Amino acid sequence: MATTEGCLVASTNRGCKAIYASGGATSVVLRDAMTRAPVVRFGTAKRAAELKFFLEDPLNFETIAAAFNQSSRFGRLQSIKCAIAGKNLYTRFSCSTGDAMGMNMVSKGTQQSLEFLQNEFPDMDVIGISGNYCSDKKPAAVNWIEGR
């Protein structure tokens, strides 16, 4: 384990010991991705919906992916999902990260994508790089359903 965080090593060791004592475990990878979900706000719900439609248009995905992928040799944008709540648009960027956990890589690529989108939607206010739609470090149904 590549960390110097003593509590994390101790906690992981206890978990591994419990798994071993109970007969071991088998796992299967169903999907390999990491997510980051910024929230942006517009002056109107209509304008937020326009960005939602823009992001969900397959013709625009390649352009956004190119902006994202420029930020890393390994991070690759796989998909973007959107959820709208009034004037707020919650976007969920799913990315491959190579052999890394890649949270910093994904955050950097997402930021690069937001900067690109800011040119297309200058009235967009970025409220936060994580708007809770990725549920980083918190248990949430969205991660159980969509993966993290």
Image: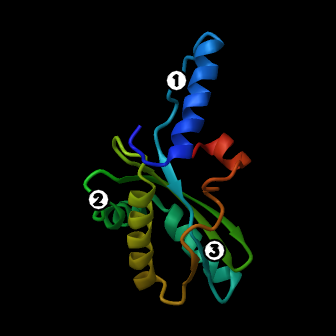
The numbered mark, 2 or 1, whose residue comes first in the sequence reads: 1
The numbered mark, 3 or 1, whose residue comes first in the sequence reads: 1
**Side of 132 where 55 appears, left or right:** left
Label pair 2/1, CB-CB below 8 angstroms: no
**Which of 41/20 is in front?**
20
Rendering coords of residue 56 (x, y %)? 53, 61
In three-dimensional space, the C-alpha distance between marks 3 and 1, rounded to whole angstroms, equals 37 Å
Who's the residue at 62% across and 85% down the image?
Answer: 42
Corner quadrant of residue 25: top right
**Which of 63/145 is in front?**
145
Q: Residues within 10 Å of mark 3 (few under 14, many from 20)?
A: many
Q: Secondary structure at mark 1?
A: loop
Q: Amino acid at mark 3?
A: Ala
Q: Amino acid at mark 1?
A: Val
Rendering coords of residue 38 (x, y %)? 56, 68
Q: Residues within 10 Å of mark 1 (few under 14, many from 20)?
A: few
Which disc number belongs to residue 49? 3
Considering only vertical position in the picture, is 64 above or below 75? Answer: below
**Which of 16/37 is in front?**
16
Q: Secondary structure at mark 2?
A: loop
Considering only vertical position in the picture, is 67 above or below 126? Answer: above
**Which residue does the numbered mark 1 point to in the structure image?**
28
**Which residue does the numbered mark 2 point to in the structure image?**
72
